[in-house]
Amino acid sequence: MFGDLMGMMGKLKETQQKVEATKKRMDTVLIDEASNDGLLKITLTANRKIKTIEIDDSLLEDKEQLEDYLILTLNKAIEKATNVHETEVAAVAKDGMPDIPGLDMFK
């Protein structure tokens, strides 16, 4: 019984390390998003850190329009990055979960 428990604890620790490594790797996964007309382009990591913002000169003439573009495009980029992040971390966590009877919520 204790051997099984120790084995499960070891597997959980290993899974935790894999999840942390995956989160760190998400800093290198880049998500690109652009406004529908391509006047604003944003790149961020899967950890939702902004890397670049490219703004067409025409948007600099209208502050309100630029703000709207930033809000819409940033929200789309953040949503994509969040989906990638959650999918990657969940896959690693699910793969590393020990087989505990009655705890099949990750399957």
Image (cartoon, helix red, strand yellow):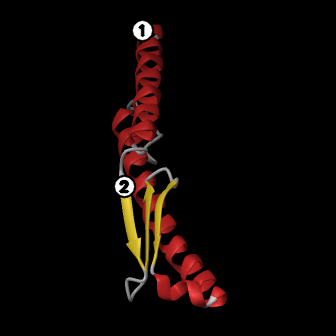
Q: Residue at x 39, y 87 (%)?
A: 36
Q: Is residue 80 left or right of residue 59?
A: left
Distance, label 1 to label 2, CA atoms, is 42 Å
**Residue 96 seen in the figure:** yes
Is label 2 in a helix, a strand or a loop? strand
Tag of residue 30: 2
Label 1 or label 2, whichever lies nearer to me, is 2
Judge left or right: residue 60 versus residue 27.
Answer: right
Q: Residue at x 50, y 76 (%)?
A: 73
Residue at 42% in and 47% down: 90
Q: Is residue 15 above or below residue 1?
A: below
Q: Say the numbered circle drawn on residue 3.
A: 1
Horizontal and vertical percent position of residue 80: 43, 66
Q: Give the amino acid type for the residue marked by disc 1 in the picture.
A: Gly
Which residue appears at 42% of the width and 9% of the height?
3
- SS of the residue at dot 1? helix
Image location (x, y in percent) of residue 54 = 45, 70
| Residue 92 disc label | none
- Pick the front one: 80 or 10: 80
Residue 12 % position (x, y): 46, 25
